[in-house]
Image: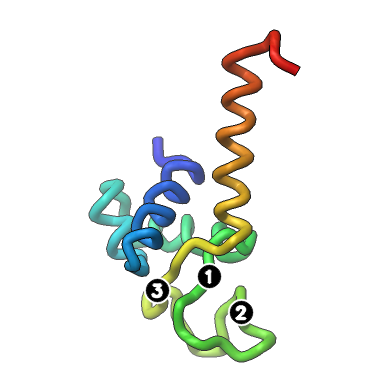
Amino acid sequence: MVTQRKVLRFIAEETRQGHSISFKDLVERFDLSPEAACDHLKRLWRERLIEAVTHRPDRFHFRLRSGEILRDLRFRLAPRGQDRLEWYSERDKRTSWPWRS
């Protein structure tokens, strides 16, 4: 199963390497349909975990403009996405070691 966490890790690694990703990268990496890849990106973008690499008008930083399609955009990890990955790690530590406070 392709989870938000797996997709975020992939995007984080690509961002660290100086690359941006598109829906095609998710299709290839996770063997997803184009529609499923776009759905993952839409959710991550809506939650502000990723950001579009191209300049966006003020009201459209995290949504499409009229007539625009997600398949034309490229993304990178946003600071909030990095925070989410850190939260996942902290949660894992707490779950793995229940005697820790």
Q: Is residue 21 above or below residue 33?
A: below
Q: Is residue 30 left or right of residue 16?
A: left
Instruction: Tell me if mark 1 has few (under 14), some (14-19) or many (20+) residues whose alpha carbon lies within 10 angstroms of its own.
Output: many
Which image quarter: residue 78? bottom right
Residue found at the very far right of the displayed protein:
101
The correct choice, above or below, for 82 with respect to 86 in the image is: below
Residue 87 location, quadrant: top right
Image position of 83 with respect to 96: above or below: below
Residue under numbered circle 2: 61
Examine the rendered structure and indicate whether residue 99 appears above or below residue 26: above
Please tell me which residue lies in front, 27 or 56.
56
Secondary element under disc 1, as helix, strand or loop, is: strand
Residue on which the image places disc 1: 51
User: Is disc 2 in contact with disc 1, using a CB cutoff of under 8 Å?
Assistant: yes
Quadrant into which the N terminus falls: top left
Q: 85 or 42, which lies in front?
A: 85
Label placed on residue 74: 3
Query: Where residue 80 sits: x, y (%)?
Result: 63, 58
What's the distance in space between the residues labelled 1 and 3, CA to CA?
Answer: 8 Å
What residue is rendered at 39% in x and 62% in y? Answer: 15
Q: Amino acid at mark 1?
A: Glu
Q: CA distance from mark 2 to mark 1?
A: 7 Å
